[in-house]
Each structure stands twice: as structure tokens, then as C-alpha cells.
């Protein structure tokens, strides 16, 4: 028995997560993402490796999507509607609710750029109809032998780690996760399981992050300083996730400091997203959940809808504008207007891809930026970079691996050199074999297998007989210590190791049976012979 | 396995209560309160009532006037609450697990959790726990009105529970207080406090549908939706000795909560059928002078095998929809005439549907009538309903995916079409109050809560309308408000498995044995049923059902199994091996894993030996070891069996007695003994 893992995406890289696992005859695809860095065939995973004939329905038992980010769900519509996969697709309720927004947003962007469209709005709607929504910890019986279960992963709303069991073989695929809670989400949570394989992300394989609190304060201070000086703050961000987190932070701060400066949301998408967040409050952090009845955390008091006419309106304001990284769209337009004034502030949350304006701003201190061949912008505004990340750091990964103690670990969704160093750590510190396959590579590991047998009542009962061993504790060492200390050390240590004599009997054409020694003689119809 | 039905309950608000002993674990199913018992008490008296009561008390001679029931015969005291009487016979500390199947089943739990020595693990679905908590808090806050009125209780034993007082009560009230058999007075207890509720909720472990939780490593417990109320569920218990499904009242169709997931209950070895709802269905609902909405469970003969669900559901759906439309049309008529509509209904599903239906019909008829919801927990409840999409039916979930609010009340609240206030004298209500209006408020018993005050206001108004839940004795419910001039409409909604569906359902579920209520025996016939056996249970009588398996399953790790040293017995063709490993109980299954601990692997000698020690083989074996021996056959008189004495001289001196069932080695040297022991061991079949 073996578990075969074929990595179609996110092998030694970040982007287009897609792992196909063959476990006791069941084939499961974890995530079906697209690569944002490519526009050619490399954008999607190479599905032909799953089934050269293109018959994906027989080749796969199910697809599991961990969260709504495009590098995890982006290729799903293409796979179901264009490639023709008709089997079940599982994701959590929030992922099912929010994925269409992300996909639609992406489709529109492709449309605007005038590129060839991979799927249509109808495709997205059709695809989502095939999705089966699951709740956390719910054990879903996909078919007779295949069980899946979602665990809370933090990261973004609805993100989940998935546990899969086929026969006696068990494994977990984490997707992206966060081991520390943030403003609106809790930390990842999982049961202690007996795993053969753990496939984990490793975005921050070597980084250890400090407390988030200091960086939050720094951010608030920068924003406050800017608006009190009459400046405008531009926060280019994606519609889902970071926008809500920062907005909770700001709204809360506004309340405390009694600020009246307006906060704007640029896109209808963000406002629409808040609607979803309000209904999905049980997937957020405990603190937010507790206050749902009196005041929903996503009912932002100081937030208004943005209108393009107020770009040049006088007075301070804060604006959340899409898309992130100042890739284009409104965030770029506003940037052009606001950048020349030194009173203003641009805050860049998170990572910026090479080639975007956001990346140019974070690398060095440019005074002039060419947005296109004809336009050059004077940049005199303040730049503030926020190093928030909803991914776990290396300590978190090590903690999870240690907690689950699987028989094998596989790293995906990370950069090659960092993965190699984490692999070494897992191997040397925890003694667990670790793999870092590249894209389109297959790794095979052995899986657990149990032999079934029946156990007789007498045997089980005898197992429960207590078998105490008492050990007197040597109290000499504690003589010098204080009285309280001595009281803490037990004088008598009791060990209860229950031992029973069991015999396994295999009779021809019968199921293996475990009996207690006295029963054996009955079965064999023999007399006992004492010596 | 032992099963005892503690109470078969009655209706939607008082679900059944059972005790099960399975795999040595004592499990309690539900802990409800019989709130219909409140009807024996008078609602908070008005000043006029109080005067009358004083008078009647002063008259002293209160006789037992049979069947002459009037408002004065009710008990004028702070109400006590009726718990499941049989539950009091159990020591609370002996219960291991409590499974709560619905928000209604949690209502009596604080009485149990506050008892001394209580240590049971309580499993409730998350939604049931939150709804149940709100319902209990509401009850406590409504009850506070009584406490304020009557003041602190004087003694631990209320005067109305005294024998002489009970004697003079009209029979209807006596039945409520003492039960039909006259033995239930022990079930009465004073109200719990808000602190008790809080404490009770803290002791709860919440689960999701289809989540596996494991009690003590032995029993795997799973909840599956049953479609009656948000969060309500059926259970599957899976232990090493087999599995049991617990089927509570279940609905195939629901307009608010997730529907009955019967597929997940398939194929268990036993099934406890605990849906008593068809018991009351079959009872004739007295029409009286009430304008009651007829319910007929006329369903086509079903073929479950075809699973023609869509038509089945739409049938039920249609019927329910028709009733709602009828109720709303009555309400519209009423407000058109200038009367108000009072809806003291506590069934969440009915309220939500009525609310949606009512607002659309009001809009359609272009009427500007305010709708009030008066309850201390209404605001929180309505907020809660909009954040639990995982617990709702398919249609509501679709709304989540479309980005719309799950229930219409979110929009209605924003548009100020409905007003939610905590109580009747809240400032917000007084400034907004406008008649005619539609009011939703607790409590269905018509004894506590805002309904009492509003009913007093409107009961004399023939233009107004009261919409009642399915109450067994509406006559009694309305007693304190007599004479009632307002129109009364009683509405009935199914809350369980219809009788016709029982057999096809059980056939689909394919259990091996079914525990079925004796009370429903005559109404269903399993006589021609071959696929499962049926045992009938009655209230308070333990039913023993034999365990399905006499041995438990054990899983041996493959790496351990490959190390087994098998020994074959010639005669029987049986392979035998000794086991060495760590035995582990996890998720209701035994596992035997490889043991790397050296400490336990010291003893190498055989456990048991059997067969005859053949002395003809023994001598050569000894001489191989360089031991000379001689044999002497002796007849043992006492046991009349042959004993063979073996004497060895060189190099050791020893006497070995070989009998049919035992061998005794006598020697001065322990080393010699162990050498000889090994020699004998070799010629016997040892394991």
C-alpha cells in the first residue's frame, strides 16, 4: 500500500496550487489554482498528466478547494467547464460564497486587458452549482471508503485544512494557513491525528515573525499623522481579506480617537464582500463572533462609498482602492492624483509583484515613476509598507508538524532554497522524512495498513484490569528546597501499566480472532498442561 | 444494551426523554421541560383579579367543584416547572453522556447541571445550544415578572402542592399537577436562575452536523440534521460493540432549517425510534367554538424505494404554504376591520415564515400596519439567524451564495417595517405604538410573557384575532381571559414523521433491530416486515436488547503483523501466535501497535502449553542435552491416571513427574530446573 503524490502546481514555487494524491485507489485533487505570473499555458496546471485521455471523471474521486484565492481556485472553472470534469467538488461555505467574486473579478480584468478569455460568467455560475459546501469538522463521506474533513486554517475567511482518510491511510493537506490569530480571523486548529502524510505550505519557510501589535501601531500612527496634517491616505488592496482586516483596525481606532475623517471603499466589490462577511461571522475570530448581536464588526460606522468625483475634493480622507499593488484601475488613477503632494500617504499592505507600481515604490525611494511610456508621475508622497501576512511563519510550520507527527511531510507553496532548509530542519529536528517535489513530479510513500481481527470480551475485559506498580520517590534531592516544593513532589509514584496475555488465532476460512489465554484451550479443545 | 424511555413527551415543545446504557456508558437523550404545566397557574393577576382572589380566599370554604372550571380555580402563586419525573429517580452523577437533540430538549438541563456530583459530558449541536440558551434566558426573564409580583418564596414547599390543596382542585388541573397516574408531583421544581443557565451553557460541548466526537475513546457520536428546528438532530452512536441510530422527530421538508438527513442513518445495527409526533396527530383536534385549521395527513401511499422526494416534499411544502397563506389572509381581514392580530407562537420556523408571508401580503394589500416583535431575546435571535447559513435549508443557503440576507427580516428591520422591542413597557414601543397592529410575542402557554397583557387588552374585542399554536387544551389556555370575544385561530404544523412514512423510512434505513414505541404499535404494523426485528418499549419500563456482537473489532498494525511468529497446530489446522504490542482504544476501535519499549518485552517463555508430554520424546531430548535419565511408570490411585516419573542423575539430580495435565520438576538447583523446563517446553505445544 502506498500514497502517490503528483504535484501539478506550487511545487518549489508559489502559484497555481494543485496536488493530486492517489491514496488506496482513490484519487483526490487538492486545489486547482492558476499562476498569476503567466498568461500562456503555464498559467494552469498540466491536467493531461492526470489522465492522458482527458477522462477526468474516472481519473479523480473528488476535488477539494482550500480557500478562495486565485492561486488555489483559479483553474477550477476551466477544469470543470472546459476540460469537462463532472465529479464532486468540495469547499467550505465561505469559499463557495466568495470564490465566484474572485473569479468574476479576474475574468473582468482579463477582459479589460483584451486577452483571450478562458471562461465566462456563465461558466463560473455553472461550476459553482457543482460545488458541495462543507462545514468545519464535518466528516463527509464522499463514497463508501473515502472520508474528508475540514479544519479551520485562519489565512482568509473560510480557509481550511483538509483531512482525508481512505481505508487505514490518512493524510492532511493544509492549503495556506496561519498559526497566529489576526484582527478578524482565528488561528488554525486541528485535532491530533495519526497521519501517514502531511502536505503543508511553506511560504515563510525560514522567516520568524515578531509581534504584529507593533506594526499595527506603526500603521495607525502613520495614517493618523497624515490625516491630521490634512493629507489623503491611499491603501491599494484586494477586495477580500486584507481590506476587511485593516478596516476593522481603522474603524476601531477612529472610534477610540473620535476621528471624523471619512474612510472610503472604492469598489462595490468590497461593499458586497462585507455583506458576505456579515453572514459568515461564525468563521471569523472569537472576539468578533461574541459581539454579533450588539454590533456586527463588519458594519463599519465611518466607512462610505467612494465616488470618483471626490478624488480631488479638499480635506483629508482614507481610501481603500482596488486592485492591490497599484496594478491599474482605480488605485492607479488615484495614485496619479495624490502622489505629487507630500502631505499624502500611500500604504502598501503585503507583497507586490515585480513590474507593478507598488513594487517600484517599495524598492528604493523613487521620485519619478513612469506608469506608461507617455506619463511620468512625480512621487513626493510618503510611502509606508505594511508587512502583514496571513501565512504562518517557520515556527508555525514546525509547530504544526511536531503536533501532528506524521510519518512523512511534503512541502509545497514556497521558494526552493527556503524549502530545502526547512526540509533539513524537519528531518534533523523531528526525524520525519520530508519531500520537496518540483512541479509534475510524483512522490510515493508507504501507507499504514491494519489487519482486522476480532477480540473476545474476556480479552478486552482483562485489558482493563489495573496493574499498578508503586515506586517510592527519593526525597533526598528535595531536602534543600523549600517546603512548598517538597509538597509538590509526590512521595509515591504510581504507574499503571496494564498487561494482558493475548493470543491470536487464525483458523482456516475464519476471521482472525484474539482471545485471552484461558479461552484458547477451549477453542483448541485441549487440556492445559502446567509445568 | 438497556434502554429506558423516561418520558414520551408531548408535542413540539416537550420532546421525549430516554436513558440508554450502551457499552457500559449511560446516555441520556434530551432533558426537556413540560411547559404546558404552566397552564395550571394563573397569569400575573391584575388588580381586579387580585381582589377577586382575596375574596374567594376569604370565603374560606373552597370546595371541590368538579368540572366547574373557572379562572379562580387556577393556582395563584409563583409557578413551578414540570420536569421529567422519571429522571429524578436517577442519580445525576451516574450519567456519563447527555445528548441534546433540539433547542427544546435543553430547557430542563440547568436543573441537572446544578445538581451535586454532576459530571456528564453534554453534546449539543452549536445552533441548538445558542437557540436553547436564548429560549432559557427568555423564560427566566419572563418568569421574573412573577417573582416581582409575589415576592420571595416563603417556604421550600409551596402550599399548592400539599395533599389537601390538590384534593380540591378540578380534575383537569389535578391531571396537570400529578399526571394521569397521580404520581408526578415529584417532577415540580422552582425556576432556575440566569446564573444556572450560564453555568449550564459552559458545561456544554458543541458539535456540528456530521462531526465525529469521541467519548472516552470508546463511543463515537455523530449528529445529523432532522429538519424540525434549527440545530435539531438525530444521533448515531458507534461503539466497539456495534452502532445505534437515535431517530427523534424528523421532518422531510423545512422552509428554514436543514432537512432530514436520513441517508446518513442508513445501515446501523439498531435503531431507536423516538418520534411520538404521530401520536398526537391521530388524536382528534377538538373543533369547539374555535376556528381551527384542519390538518389532514392525507398522503399518497409512498414508495420510498423510488425516493421520489421532490414530489413528496413539494406536497408537504404546498400544504404548509397553503396554511400560511390562509393564516395571513385571516390576519389581513382582521386588520382591515380595524382589529389587531396577536401571535403567541414560539416555533421559530413558523414565526419566520409567517413574518415573511405576512409582510408580503400586507404589502400586496397596500396596508400600512406595524408589526411588533416583543421578546427579551428577539433582537439577538434575529441577529443570530442571519449568521448561521450552515444550519439552514438549501434555499436559504442559496441566498448566502447570492450575497443576499438569509431571512427577509434583515431588510424589514432596516425599512422599519418590523419593530423589535425587549418588553411591553419599553420606551421604544410606547412611543411607536399604533393600533391596529400585528404582534409576535411569547409565550404559547398564554401564562407568561408579553402575551398576557396584550391578550387582556384585546380579548374582549371581536374584531381582533388570536393565532394559537397547536395546544392540547386551548379551552384551558384561554380560561383566565374569559369571556373571550376575539377570534381564535389554531394552527397546526407537522413536526414529525407521518405514520404512513414510518415503514418505508425504516425499510430504507435498514437497521437490524428497531426499538419502537408501544403506543404506536397499533397504528403501524410491522407484522409482514422481514428485514428487521422490532421490540416495543413503554414509558418507564427498561427494555433489554442483546448486543449485536459478542466480540469487538481489533486492528493490528501491518508492521506488527509482519513480525508474528506463527505456530501451527497439527490437528486442527489452526495457526496461533502470541501478541506483543501496545493496545490502544481510539475512536471506538481497538488498535494493536508495535511496541518499541524494551521493558515489556522480557518474558520469553510460553504462556500456555497443551497436549501430552510424550516421555518417549522427552528422553531423547534430554540425552541430546547430555542428561541421563531413567523412567518409572507409576499408577496414581487418587486420580486414576498414569504418572511418569523421570529420574535424572548425571550431571544434575532431579525428579520430574509427568502427568496428563501437569509436569512437576523437583530439584535442588534453580538452574537445573530451568534447563529441564526448557526441555519440556520444547516437546509441548506452547504458545
Image (spheres, rainbow, N blue to C red):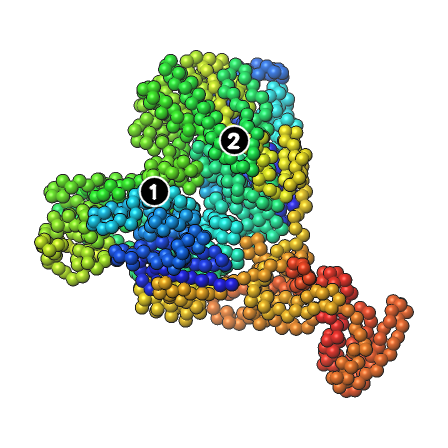
Q: Quadrant of the C terminus of chain A?
A: bottom right
Measuring 19% from the left and 48% from the top, which residue is drawn there?
Answer: A329
Residue position for label 2: B495
The quadrant holding residue A308 is top left
Chain bearing tag 2 is: B
- Residue A216, position in %: x, y? 26, 53
Label 1 to label 2, Cα distance in Å? 35 Å
- Residue B483, position in %: x, y? 49, 13
Chain bearing tag 1 is: A
Measuring 21% from the left and 40% from the top, which residue is drawn there?
Answer: A305
The quadrant holding residue B617 is bottom right
Residue B666 image label:
none
Residue A32 higher or lower than B436, as above or below: below
* Label 1, residues with CA under 10 Å away: few <14, some 14-19, many ≥20: few
Residue A196 higher or lower than A64, as above or below: below
Residue A125 image label:
1
Q: Left or right: where does residue A518 sit relative to residue B38?
A: right
Amino acid at each position: 500500500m502506498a500514497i502517490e503524490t503528483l504535484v501539478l502546481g506550487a511545487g518549489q514555487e508559489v502559484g497555481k496550487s494543485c496536488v493530486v494524491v492517489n491514496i488506496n485507489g482513490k484519487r483526490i485533487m487538492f486545489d486547482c489554482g492558476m499562476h498569476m505570473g503567466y498568461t500562456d499555458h503555464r498559467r494552469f496546471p498540466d491536467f493531461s498528466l492526470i489522465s492522458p485521455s482527458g477522462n477526468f471523471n474516472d481519473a479523480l474521486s473528488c476535488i477539494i478547494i482550500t480557500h478562495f484565492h486565485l492561486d488555489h481556485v483559479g483553474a477550477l472553472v476551466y477544469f470543470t467547464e472546459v476540460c469537462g470534469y463532472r465529479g464532486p467538488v468540495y469547499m467550505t461555505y465561505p469559499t463557495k460564497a466568495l470564490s465566484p467574486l474572485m473569479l468574476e473579478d479576474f475574468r473582468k480584468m482579463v477582459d479589460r486587458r483584451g486577452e483571450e478569455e478562458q471562461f465566462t460568467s456563465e461558466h463560473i455560475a455553472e461550476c459553482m452549482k457543482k460545488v458541495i459546501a462543507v462545514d468545519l469538522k464535518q466528516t463527509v463521506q464522499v463514497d463508501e471508503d473515502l472520508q474528508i474533513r475540514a479544519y479551520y486554517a485562519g489565512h482568509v475567511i473560510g480557509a481550511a485544512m483538509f483531512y482525508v482518510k481512505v481505508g487505514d491511510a490518512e493524510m492532511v493537506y493544509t492549503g495556506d494557513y496561519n498559526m497566529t490569530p489576526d484582527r478578524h480571523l482565528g488561528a488554525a486548529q486541528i485535532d491530533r491525528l495519526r497521519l501517514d502524510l502531511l502536505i503543508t505550505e511553506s511560504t515563510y519557510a525560514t522567516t520568524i515573525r515578531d509581534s504584529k501589535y507593533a506594526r499595527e501601531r506603526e500603521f495607525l500612527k502613520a495614517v493618523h499623522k497624515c490625516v491630521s496634517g490634512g493629507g489623503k491616505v491611499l491603501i491599494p488592496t484586494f477586495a477580500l481579506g486584507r481590506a476587511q482586516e485593516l478596516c476593522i483596525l481603522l474603524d476601531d481606532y477612529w472610534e477610540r480617537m473620535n476621528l471624523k475623517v471619512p474612510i472610503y471603499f472604492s469598489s462595490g466589490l468590497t461593499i458586497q464582500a462585507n455583506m458576505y462577511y456579515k453572514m459568515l461571522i461564525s468563521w471569523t475570530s472569537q472576539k468578533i463572533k461574541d459581539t454579533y448581536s450588539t454590533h456586527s464588526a463588519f458594519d463599519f460606522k465611518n466607512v462610505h462609498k467612494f465616488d470618483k468625483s471626490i478624488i480631488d475634493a479638499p480635506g483629508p480622507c482614507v481610501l481603500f482602492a482596488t486592485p492591490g499593488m497599484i496594478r491599474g484601475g482605480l488605485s492607479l488613477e488615484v495614485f496619479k492624483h495624490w502622489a505629487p503632494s507630500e502631505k499624502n500617504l500611500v500604504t502598501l499592505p503585503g507583497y507586490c509583484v515585480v513590474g507593478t507600481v507598488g513594487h517600484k515604490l517599495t524598492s528604493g525611494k523613487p521620485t519619478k515613476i513612469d506608469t506608461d511610456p507617455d506619463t511620468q508621475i512625480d512621487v513626493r508622497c510618503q510611502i509606508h509598507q505594511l508587512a502583514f501576512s496571513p501565512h504562518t511563519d517557520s515556527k508555525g510550520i514546525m509547530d504544526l508538524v511536531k503536533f501532528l507527527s506524521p510519518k512523512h511531510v511534503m512541502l509545497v507553496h514556497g521558494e526552493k532554497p527556503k524549502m530545502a532548509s526547512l526540509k533539513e530542519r524537519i528531518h534533523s529536528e523531528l526525524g520525519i522524512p520530508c519531500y520537496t517535489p518540483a512541479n509534475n513530479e510524483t512522490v510515493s510513500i508507504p501507507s499504514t495498513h491494519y489487519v482486522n481481527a476480532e477480540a473476545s470480551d474476556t480479552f478486552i475485559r482483562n485489558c482493563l484490569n489495573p496493574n499498578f506498580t508503586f515506586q517510592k520517590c527519593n526525597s533526598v534531592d528535595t531536602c534543600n528546597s523549600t517546603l512548598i516544593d517538597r509538597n509538590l513532589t509526590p512521595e509515591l509514584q504510581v504507574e499503571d501499566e496494564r498487561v494482558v496475555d493475548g493470543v491470536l488465532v487464525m483458523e482456516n476460512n475464519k476471521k482472525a480472532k484474539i482471545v485471552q489465554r484461558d479461552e484458547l484451550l477451549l477453542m483448541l479443545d485441549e487440556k492445559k498442561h502446567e509445568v | 444494551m438497556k434502554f429506558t424511555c423516561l418520558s414520551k413527551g408531548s408535542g413540539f415543545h416537550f420532546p421525549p426523554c430516554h436513558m440508554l446504557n450502551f457499552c457500559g456508558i449511560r446516555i441520556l437523550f434530551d432533558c426537556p421541560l413540560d411547559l404546558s404545566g404552566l397552564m395550571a397557574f394563573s397569569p400575573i393577576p391584575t388588580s381586579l383579579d387580585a381582589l377577586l382572589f382575596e375574596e374567594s380566599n376569604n370565603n374560606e370554604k373552597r370546595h371541590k367543584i368538579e368540572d366547574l372550571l373557572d379562572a379562580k380555580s387556577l393556582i395563584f402563586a409563583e409557578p413551578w416547572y414540570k420536569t421529567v419525573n422519571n429522571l429524578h429517580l436517577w442519580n445525576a452523577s451516574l450519567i456519563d453522556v447527555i445528548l441534546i437533540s433540539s433547542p427544546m430538549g435543553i430547557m430542563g438541563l440547568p436543573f441537572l447541571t446544578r445538581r451535586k456530583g454532576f459530571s456528564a459530558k453534554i453534546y449539543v449541536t452549536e445552533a441548538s445550544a445558542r437557540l436553547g440558551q436564548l429560549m432559557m434566558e427568555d423564560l427566566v426573564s419572563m418568569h421574573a415578572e412573577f417573582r416581582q409580583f409575589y415576592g420571595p418564596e416563603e417556604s421550600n414547599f409551596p402550599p399548592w402542592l400539599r395533599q389537601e390543596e390538590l384534593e380540591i382542585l378540578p380534575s383537569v388541573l389535578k391531571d396537570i399537577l400529578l399526571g394521569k397516574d397521580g404520581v408526578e408531583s415529584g417532577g415540580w421544581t422552582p425556576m432556575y436562575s440566569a446564573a444556572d443557565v450560564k453555568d449550564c451553557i459552559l458545561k456544554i460541548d458543541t458539535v456540528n452536523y456530521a462531526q465525529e466526537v469521541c467519548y472516552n475513546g470508546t463511543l463515537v457520536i455523530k449528529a445529523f440534521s432532522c429538519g424540525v428546528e434549527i440545530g435539531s438532530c438525530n444521533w448515531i452512536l458507534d461503539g466497539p460493540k456495534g452502532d445505534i441510530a437515535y431517530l427523534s422527530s424528523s421532518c422531510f421538508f423545512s422552509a428554514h432549517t436543514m432537512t432530514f438527513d436520513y441517508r446518513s442513518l442508513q445501515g446501523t445495527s439498531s435503531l431507536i425510534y423516538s418520534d411520538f409526533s404521530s401520536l398526537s396527530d391521530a388524536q382528534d383536534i377538538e373543533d369547539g367554538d374555535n376556528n381551527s385549521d384542519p390538518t389532514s395527513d392525507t398522503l399518497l401511499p409512498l414508495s420510498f424505494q423510488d425516493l421520489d422526494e421532490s414530489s413528496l416534499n413539494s406536497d408537504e411544502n404546498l400544504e404548509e404554504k397553503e396554511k400560511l397563506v390562509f393564516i395571513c389572509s385571516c390576519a389581513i381581514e382582521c386588520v382591515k376591520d380595524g382589529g389587531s392580530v396577536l401571535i403567541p407562537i414560539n416555533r421559530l420556523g413558523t414565526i419566520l415564515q409567517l413574518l415573511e408571508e405576512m409582510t408580503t401580503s400586507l404589502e400586496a394589500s397596500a396596508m400600512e400596519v406595524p408589526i411588533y416583535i416583543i421578546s427579551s431575546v428577539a433582537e439577538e435571535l434575529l441577529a443570530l439567524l442571519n449568521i448561521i447559513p450552515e444550519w439552514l435549508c438549501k434555499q436559504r443557503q442559496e441566498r448566502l451564495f447570492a450575497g443576499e440576507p438569509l431571512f427577509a427580516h434583515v431588510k424589514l428591520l432596516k425599512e422599519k417595517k418590523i419593530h423589535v422591542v425587549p418588553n411591553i413597557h419599553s420606551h421604544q414601543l410606547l412611543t411607536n405604538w399604533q393600533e391596529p397592529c400585528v404582534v409576535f410575542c411569547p409565550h404559547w402557554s398564554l401564562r407568561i410573557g408579553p402575551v398576557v397583557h396584550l391578550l387582556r387588552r384585546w380579548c374582549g374585542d371581536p374584531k381582533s384575532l388570536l393565532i394559537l399554536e397547536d395546544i392540547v387544551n386551548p379551552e384551558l389556555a384561554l380560561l383566565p381571559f374569559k369571556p373571550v370575544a376575539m377570534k381564535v385561530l389554531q394552527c397546526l404544523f407537522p413536526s414529525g414523521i407521518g405514520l404512513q412514512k414510518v415503514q418505508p423510512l425504516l425499510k430504507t434505513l435498514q437497521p437490524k433491530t428497531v426499538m419502537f414505541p408501544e403506543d404506536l404499535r397499533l397504528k403501524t404494523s410491522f407484522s409482514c416486515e422481514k428485514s428487521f426485528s422490532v421490540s416495543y418499549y413503554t414509558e418507564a419500563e427498561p427494555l433489554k436488547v442483546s448486543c449485536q456482537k459478542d466480540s469487538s473489532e481489533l486492528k493490528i498494525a501491518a508492521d506488527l503483523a509482519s513480525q508474528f511468529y506463527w505456530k501451527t497446530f497439527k490437528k486442527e489446522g489452526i495457526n496461533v501466535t502470541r501478541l506483543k504490542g501496545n493496545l490502544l482504544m481510539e475512536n471506538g476501535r481497538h488498535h494493536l501497535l508495535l511496541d518499541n519499549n524494551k521493558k515489556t518485552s522480557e518474558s520469553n517463555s510460553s504462556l500456555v502449553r497443551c497436549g501430552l508430554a510424550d516421555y518417549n520424546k522427552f528422553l531423547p531430548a534430554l540425552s541430546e542435552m547430555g542428561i541421563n535419565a531413567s523412567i518409572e511408570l507409576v499408577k496414581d490411585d487418587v486420580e486414576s491416571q498414569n504418572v511418569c516419573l523421570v529420574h535424572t542423575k548425571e550431571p544434575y539430580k532431579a525428579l520430574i513427574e509427568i502427568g496428563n495435565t501437569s509436569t512437576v520438576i523437583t530439584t535442588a538447583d534453580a538452574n537445573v530446573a530451568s534447563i529441564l523446563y526448557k526441555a519440556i517446553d520444547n516437546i509441548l505445544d506452547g504458545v
